[in-house]
Image (cartoon, grey):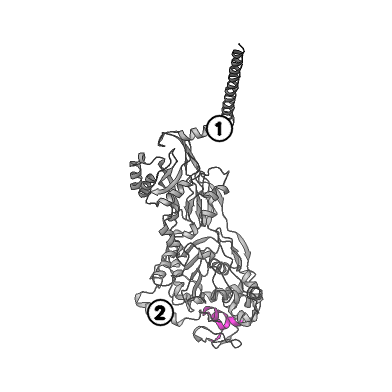
Amino acid sequence: MLEALMKKKSDDGRFRYLYWVIIAIFAILVCRLAYLQLVEGEYYHSLAEGNRLRAVPIAAMRGVMYDRNGQILVGSRPSFMVTYVPTKDGMSDAELNELSQLLNIPEAKLREKIDKVKSSYIPTVLANDLTQDIVTKIEERRNELPGISIDVQPIRYYPYNEMAAQIFGYVGQIDEDDQQRLEGQEGVSNITQIGRAGLEAYYDDLLRGKDGGRQVEVDATGSPVKEMERKNPVAGHNIHLTIDLNLQQAAEKAMDSQIANGIGTAGIAMVALDPNTGAVLAMASRPSYNPNWFTRGITEAEWSQINDNPYHPMENRAIAGEYPPGSPFKIITGAAALELKKVTPDELIFDSGRHWLVDMRNAGGEALGWINFTEALSKSDNVYFYEMGRRVGIDKLAEYAAMFGMGKKTGIDLRGESSGLIASEKYKMDTFGEDWYLGDTFNSAIGQGFQLVTPLQAAMIVSEVANGGIQYRPFLVSRIDNLDGTPYKIFAPEQIGTLSISRSTLDLIREGMRNVTEEGTAGYIFADFPIQVAGKTGTAENYSGQDHGWFVAYAPFDHPRIVIAVLVEQGGYGSSASAPIVKEMLEEFFHVGKYAAGMPKDEDKDKQANADEAAPQDAEPAE
């Protein structure tokens, strides 16, 4: 009996233990269920929905860029892109290999993109701008490539390829840095295109628009079944540029022609301005690149073509290149000497071919005898302007250079602008720890030595002379539109300064510049040209190669409508390297027939070559 009671008591203990174990298990399950439902419920709901629904972003159309006459310069076009959403089993090596062959993209590059996928239900772009042939092949093998889809999205398009590439810039797909920077902004998705350079970058927030999206139901393989919901994208603002398409094309054609002739292979920069407003009529830099490459995903071969080019195709030389101004700086030296009464317009100075204090000479030992200001400017006489530099002094030269806008950025609506450099005693001492000598002043007076200027600054200097001394900020955009076509913002000319220089001095400078194209260093280029042109040649010494060639000009002489500055790196004489480009631009701008304007024919080439030899006074001698 006692044994039976003991056994019953033992069994009751075991049941009681089992009872509490079961209670504990159910309590844990209830707590876990409550946790999953109340705390993690939203997460697992979204995960489940993500397996059933796909949020497919729809890229917004970037705003169109028009030229000043309404011609499309940059737009968008539809394109096919392939996207990937991870499936349960992921992508096998065999599937990756097949996709690689279809897209003609290395497996390693595809694997890198796939491994970066963070979301299990947001599509990741693997390739875009696919040809119809590739799209067809992928669609035929859709069942063999789980998680792969084809979508149609707008893509940026540059119809003129390399033309004005440094102005327009290019776009690229958004990356992690962009996503962090734009976090919280409406309409930004993983397929947003971001402006990387040029106007695309400067006005990116307006051009970009807002991406939309659609929610689609998918089957087990990830293939779309039906669309559940849609949010339409909002297009970006259209912008109207000050650029004249015909002038831009004529300029770049002339630049390429010079390069084809072996002139300017190291680089060419060109800027054309409206001197009455500051509007940029044309701007170009050579070598260039094709921004369409970046839009669709640049290949290694294309990137090597850009990156391995020693002359940096992506650099906008017109605003970033810094060069000795050469003889165009004589405009500033002459203005300072006349305004400070260091010389009178009629004073004659004897040019024996060398200065009498420092043995610095004209190019080729040329000697012009007794000359006054306008003759010295038109024939680009070095000895005369050495003497002007001596009389004015380096401090006043620096003061007048700053007055004309040297040594500071113009503020144009592009990134990457350089400020140039004004020569001074302080700069030489701070940089090189050396004293200043009279020879330094001589060099500075003719635009050599430490003086540096960008082609845009050179164009502004001439613009100030042409319009009577008004400094306008150069600009590229004249209007930004709302989505309905009404003006969002209109850009008016912005005056940023005025030259404290008398009208009589500016008149003398203009007269000297007119004589340059009539009987001076560029006379043979503009012989019989029906429009009066004022210009200035320049040959800037380059210590690492052949001299750079300058030509700056404005026209018409009496009522200026256009200013042009052209710099040909290692081009030699400005009269033969740069002036022909300016002339072809003026022919286009004024609708002047090529040969009616006196353009030398083939039989005149020998005469032109002889004229080059006979007009070397714009070349600067070594110190």
Q: Which residue occupies the foreground of this view, 79 or 524?
A: 79
Marked residue nearer the N-terminal end (2 or 1): 1
The relative height of residue 490 versus residue 47 in the rendered view (above or below) is below
- Dot 2 amino acid type: Ala
Is residue 289 a member of the stretch shown in magenta?
A: no
On the image, the x and y values in percent for residue 612 come to 44, 79
Helix, strand or loop at disc 1?
helix
Q: Which residue occupies the foreground of this view, 7 or 99?
A: 7
Within the image, what quadrant is residue 21 found in?
top right
Q: Which residue, given by chain and number where applicable, does mark 1 sit on?
A: 42
Within the image, what quadrant is residue 396 found in?
bottom right
Question: Which quarter of the rendered picture does the C terminus lie within?
Answer: bottom right
Question: Which quarter of the rendered picture does the N terminus lie within?
Answer: top right
On the image, the x and y values in percent for residue 177 come to 55, 50
Can the viewer see residue 561 in this picture?
Answer: no
Q: Is residue 452 left or right of residue 591?
A: right
Does the magenta stretch mainly form a helix, a strand or a loop?
A: helix
Magenta region, residue range: 369-387
Helix, strand or loop at disc 2?
helix
Q: Which residue, given by chain and number where applicable, does mark 2 sit on?
A: 609
Q: Residue lying furthest top in this view?
A: 1
The relative height of residue 562 versus residue 330 in the rendered view (above or below) is above
On the image, the x and y values in percent for residue 508 come to 58, 76
